Amino acid sequence: MTPPAARPYNFSAGPAAMPVEVLQQAAAEMLDWQGTGMSVMEMSHRGKAFMSICEAAERDLRELLEVPEHFRILFMQGGGLAENAIVPMNLSRGGAMDFIVTGSWSQKSAQEARKFGQIRIAASNEAEHHTTLPAPATWQLSDNAQYVHLCSNETIHGVEFQELPDLAALGSRAPLVIDFSSHVASRPVDWSRVGLAFGGAQKNLGPAGLTLVVVREDLLGHALPLCPSAFNYQTVADNASMYNTPPTYAIYMAGLTFQWLKRQTQGPATGIAAMEQRNIAKANLLYDFIDGSQLYLNKVARDCRSRMNIPFFLREESRNEAFLTGAQAAGLLQLKGHKSVGGMRASLYNAMPLAGVQALVDYMRDFEKTQA
């Protein structure tokens, strides 16, 4: 299936664009999913039809991300913000937690975790205005931390860890917790370095409403007494994510996205490996243009630039509104930067084709010429 010719390119940071093939399939199945006479959103979450959808989604995701068998995949609700509380309720044991602060999202995570134990900022890039990443060798990790928290891609500031740290090599026995909301399924995950990963689906996996948690089995069963049952990872795992009514339609849409990802190819690469190659090409195209421009500027250090979220600025901010107005007219949507940092931001998630990035570069080039 090919997208309609007039469909705009949506650069939203989330909820974000979804693959057109997925939207078309969901539309075709809206009133009647595979002869059941029901829409997926009308099904019982414990009925045979929906259980088959959920089981297939979990199976496909495990295959795509190569999740080892000793990790459990949980489909939850509440988004990344809720996980900022749910993680410490499950893993802190009321003790110390280390945080690597690299932008707005890791700052929020640390602030929320203060309610459930002692937190320590083991490293921060705040002095550099979140434009660099602190080298793992410089982290001041605690001896008694229950876990180390890392946002591996900061959506607002546009910094991304190109490689997950090896905490064991740094002398820490604590599990690594990563918020991978904004780059999940855009690149492989080294699960040997991860204890728990969480992320909202609304950037790379599907619509808002579904939160993914991938947790190592030995980290289950340690929730604080105050942890609500519906947020206790052990309870959710024991009930196959069905302890309370899950976000059924969001799981269905994510499952369609997983199937779409499995079909993707790039030369000999398939699935996530293919997407990583495409994402590198898309990001390089935009960064190379910005770096060669006299009008646009990206402030992030080159060794930690995000492939997913690219903030950029016009050197003369008085031209911002004209830029956004022209972009909208050209079918390039939601390019305004986050209110906390200003400027522009282009999010290049998996569903964004290379053609969309080329269209953005062409527009940026033409706009720059008109401003000369």
Image: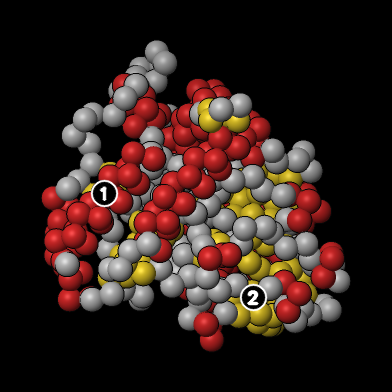
Q: Residue furthest bottom?
A: 127
Query: Does 83 sit above or below residue 111?
Result: above
* Residue at horizontal 60 percent and vertical 30 percent from the top: 269
Q: Quadrant of residue 36?
A: top left
Q: Of the numbered discs in the image, which one, if any, rests on residue 362? A: 1
Instruction: Provide the residue designation for mark 2.
Output: 134
- Depth check: 321 or 31 in front? 321
Tell me if 220 is positioned left or right of 127 in this view. Answer: right
Identity, as a three-letter code, of the amino acid under mark 1: Asp
Image x and y of residue 226, in percent: 64, 69
Image x and y of residue 182, in percent: 49, 55
Query: Does 272 sit above or below residue 48?
Result: below
Whether residues under marks 2 and 1 lie with C-beta atoms below 8 angstroms apart, the answer is no
- In terms of sequence position, does the residue under pointer 2 or pointer 1 come before the other? 2
* Residue at horizontal 53 percent and vertical 65 percent from the top: 302
Tell me if 302 is positioned left or right of 358 in this view. Answer: right
- Depth check: 61 or 170 in front? 170
The secondary element bearing badge 1 is classed as helix
Q: Residue furthest top?
A: 35
Tell me if 272 is positioned left or right of 308 in this view. Answer: right
Identity, as a three-letter code, of the amino acid under mark 2: Pro
